[in-house]
Image: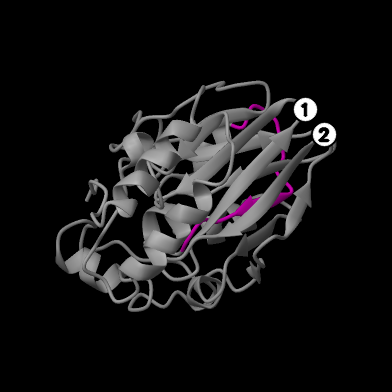
Amino acid sequence: MRLNDHVDLVGSGAAGFDLTDSLDCHVYLVRGERACALIDAGAGRDVAAIMGNLGGDVPAYLLLTHGHADHAGGAAALERRIPGLRVLAGPPADRWIATGDERMISLDRARAGGTYPRDYTFAPCPGIEPIADGALIDLGGVTLRAVATPGHADGHTCYLLEAAGHRALFSGDCVFTGGRVSLQNLHDCRIPAYAASLTRLAELEVDALFPGHHEISLRRAHRHLTTARDVLARGLLPESTT
């Protein structure tokens, strides 16, 4: 699904557009003049469907927003299938993804709560690398900058796309349209850190917002970021999608 000149939606599950497996988050393909990158990997139950939607493009990078299974569960399979693919995530999530630590990515709780079926497993991705706040990936005419945004989960990282006359934010589960967030009763969901991350994002002037689930905003997307910040400024918490 073509979203704009640089971005395709190649995966999306039941909390989106039902392009691929029901557990998948939105999976985006970002194209530059020299290279392509994937943003998030889906849950890993049907990587073939995501691969089939690439349209012949061969990504050089897989940038993960965080370690939850619907975003990172497909990383190991994509790394096996795409030669030379570099997989990156913010620390400490990179270490949990590398070892498949189901407790630290809260998969044990999500499975017990019925979010994932009992037979779902998370494949370790030992080749993953950490990506630092501010790190820049240059795809040729298009850059992706890592923006550390803990709060929804430790290691959560958004990615800011910059191209000629256009800026977009891949926000994972940090912020959604309407300024909504994703608060969960998990060990690394931290409200003060979340508030700081949302305040930081509101300083970014973006045209488009590409979140990990639900609706996508292709124009005037900055309003979604300022909505979340303004709710926080009143001493309240934004509406949670979870």
| Image side of residue 120 versus residue 126, left or right | left
Outermost residue toward the left? 113
Q: Residues within 10 Å of mark 2 (few under 14, many from 20)?
A: some
Q: Residues within 10 Å of mark 1 (few under 14, many from 20)?
A: few
Q: Position of residue 13 (x, y in %)?
A: 34, 38
Q: Position of residue 233 (x, y in %)?
A: 33, 52
Q: Between 225 and 137, which is closer to the camera in this rendering?
A: 225
Q: Main secondary structure of the magenta part?
A: loop
Q: To which quarter of the image does residue 117 belong?
A: bottom left
Q: Between 150 and 45, which is closer to the camera in this rendering?
A: 150
- The correct choice, above or below, for 78 with respect to 67 in the image is above
Outermost residue toward the front? 234
Q: Which residues are magenta?
A: 54-66
Q: Which residue is mark 1?
A: 164
- The correct choice, above or below, for 191 with respect to 145 in the image is below
Question: Looking at numbered disc 2 in the image, what kind of residue is underneath it?
Answer: Gly
Q: Is residue 61 magenta?
A: yes
Residue ID at (69%, 46%): 144
Q: Is residue 240 visible?
A: yes
